[in-house]
Amino acid sequence: FPAASAEEGEVVAILDDGLIAAAGERHLDAERGEADQTLATMANTDYVRDENKESFGQGEYINPKAKWHIGYITMYNYDEDFAIIKALAASGDFSVTRLDASNPNNDFGPYNLLVISPMPASTAFGIIQMKGCDRPILLLKPFVLKSSVWNWGTPVNTSDLSIHVQKPEHDIFRHIDVSNGTLQLFSKLRGDAAVTYISDWHNVPGVVSLATPTSNGEGCSIAEFPEGIYANGTKIWSKIIMLGFSEHSLQHITEDAQRLLLNCSYYLIDEDLK
């Protein structure tokens, strides 16, 4: 697994004193107490996966009654992942299984949808492997698109908490109030980054921009890659949605952002939104 770094704004974890944690180092953040108490059980070291029992643990949500199965690509047991797992579990329709971002040989066959967490380094072998994958993908880390990884665009971090919605009629915004043209994704800033965007695309005709960062109307914070287009020579076999979430402020995503995550999941598997 390549060493994680703060290059181009990426981090793995931020310690209480603001220092960046080394790759492979896990830290329970000082703000941990703000997390939902149900999700606190996910950090229980006694967790044992049981496919026949509903349970949280180790960055997963096992739901034996689930209609759809998500492969969640991350590393270790990051507290920051809890908010995303909570959003994906909210409807009861999904079971979420953690897949190791450092593994270049993950089997995606059992999953209806793949979700790339903002937490791992974008250069993790298991993420590099996913370029050209034939499963729908919810990409929560735009830095995966940088030139040294998938080479589809140039990612940039911002301190914005909100985005400008360009296509409010799109299904991913259903049941979310975007009547004023903006959508708040983060309740507060942690570190120096929240909303992430792509400043320019690397030969991706057909990509659809759905939202921009509030600080840059020319950037793209939410993008759809329709099935069948080519991204810098790579065919898109199944739809991809990119959401510009920075791992810095991930613990502070809003309820609307959680609804957006769930909407995107239904949209990507072509299921009617609840």
Image (spheres, helix red, strand yellow):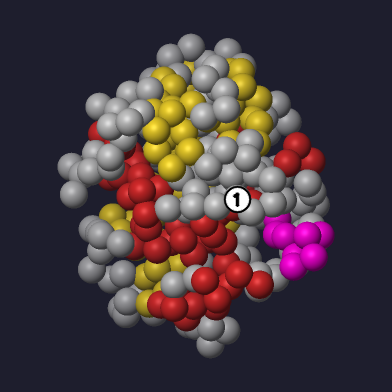
Q: Position of residue 58 (x, y in %)?
A: 53, 72
Magenta: predominant secondary structure element?
loop
Left or right of residue 79, residue 137 in this image: left
Is 130 drawn above or below residue 29 in the view shown?
above
Residue at 33%, 31% in the rendered image: 180
Q: Nearer the viewer, residue 206 or 13?
A: 13
In this rendering, would 114 be left or right of 233? Answer: left
**Badge 1 element:** loop
Q: Is residue 221 visible to us here?
A: yes
- Magenta-tinted stretch: 12-19
Identify the residue under disc 1: 189
Q: Residue furthest bottom?
A: 46
* Relative to 253, residue 8 above or below: above
Left or right? Give the position of 240 relative to 143. Answer: left
Residue 181 in percent (x, y) is at 35, 28
**Residue 14 counted in the magenta span:** yes
Give the amino acid type for the residue marked by disc 1 in the picture: Leu
Spot occupied by residue 163 in the image (x, y as percentages of width and height): 46, 33
Q: Which one is nearer the viewer's eye here, 254 or 174? A: 254
Name the residue: 69% across, 46% down.
Answer: 192
